[in-house]
Amino acid sequence: MIKAKPSEYIQKYGGKAGGYFYLKDYGGFNLHLLPALFLSPDDADSPLDRDFLKSFSQFIVRASHPNDYEGLVDVLKTEIVNDPSRLEEVCRDIRQSANDSLVFSYSEYEGQPYDGKIRLMIHPYNGPSRGSMVEHPHKKGTYLIDFIEPNDHHTYTFIERVIVEGKEIKNEWADFTEAKSIDTIEEVLALYKKVRATDFISPDFSFQMEFGINQLSLGKASTLFYQARPFKRFEESPFEMPPPSEYFCFGTTPKEGIILPVVKTSPGELKAAHEMTEPFAWIPINITSQAPLAFRPKNMRAFLPVGMRVNTLEHNTYRWIRKADVSVVCPLIEYALIALQTGDRINIKSNGLNFEVNKTS
């Protein structure tokens, strides 16, 4: 058993790489960890390990920093490299992008001073089949697993949601691809619980685990660990609401709800949300790409996205679910939300498992 605290690993290796090295030293996770080449800020001008580079034909380079344990979602670059001769160039480009002034000011917006000294983690590229999962912060023992698969032409991805409630596996959401095998689901769940049993993430918080489905073999397990970071603090539902729940919301309100003005935005037109000076409910349309770093809403209390993939925990929704007091990520109310206009007022009620959204004026 290791003696160092998780915070020491995060400080040394950064949030993304910190989990990898913590689990490696903790023991029992080797089969779930791909080979890695780690570069500290002091290694910026050092040549890469040639033996490592000769061992694989494709690589993925991920930037890591202590601040990305809690924040910097979608901010620090990850690059897939198909030509090993370009790796050093890619590493320089990632370091340069991490020192853009927008990254410094964005991290300060998130409440974390930033020094630009990123770490780099280089793995053999395992392919695009991956996923992420959380334990529901308002119902312990219930897990939301998103399996992410490319289509045949890699032009977009399918995301399939699997819900695990205790011993019951709800695996019927595979609209476009075959439902995941029970063995795969159980393996992902077992890895998540194994990570939970360490103290890398505070037991007060649900956490997100990003994982891969092993395409490389390399003597590793079929489920690979990529990253773990805090999601939302565990909180029991404070009051009852009518079922059924399909876990389309996060965060709780008072029983009477909260009344907020609406700001509805389309891609590229985020100014109204950025400049809002009072608490508001943000309804972004088609949030399928990263918002620019200059977009920094300070008063967003409710997040109600509309469009593709709103009920998944991909990066473009994860960032805002973490920031909002309450989020409703439900495709079933899309038409009601689209009908709302900026300036309308709505009452949002949520016990963390069920919700109501009603226009008040």
Image (tube, grey):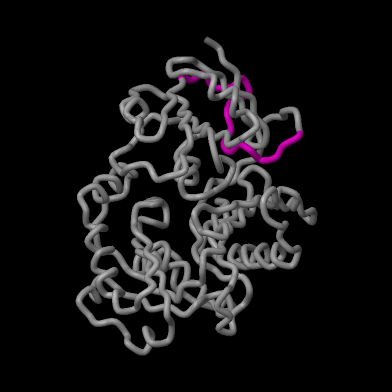
In percent of width and height, residue 184 lies at 70, 66
- Residue lying at the far front in this picture: please name it: 153
Tell me if residue 84 can be seen: yes
Image point (43%, 23%), residue name = 263
Where's the N terminus, which quadrant? bottom right
Q: Determine whether 279 is above or below 320 in the image.
A: above
Question: Which residue is found at the position 68% from the left and 45% from the top?
Answer: 139
Where is residue 217, by image quadrant?
A: bottom right
Quarter of the image for residue 180 reads bottom right
Residue extending farthest to the right is 168
Q: Tell me if 33 is positioned left or right of 45 in this view.
A: right
Residue 1 lies, with reference to residue 135, above or below; the image says below
Q: Is residue 250 magenta?
A: yes
Find residue 55 and report its horizontal and vertical position in percent: 43, 86
**Callout count:** 0
Residue 131 visible: no
141 magenta-colored = no
Q: Residue at x 62, y 30 (%)?
A: 350
Q: Is residue 274 left or right of residue 34?
A: left
Span shown in magenta: 244-261
x 25%, y 76%: residue: 43
The image position of residue 162, as x and y in percent, is 69, 52
* Residue at the extreme top: 361
Judge by depth and name the residue closer to the eye, 228 or 7.
Answer: 228
Q: Main secondary structure of the magenta part?
A: loop
Q: Percent position (x, y) of residue 355?
A: 64, 29
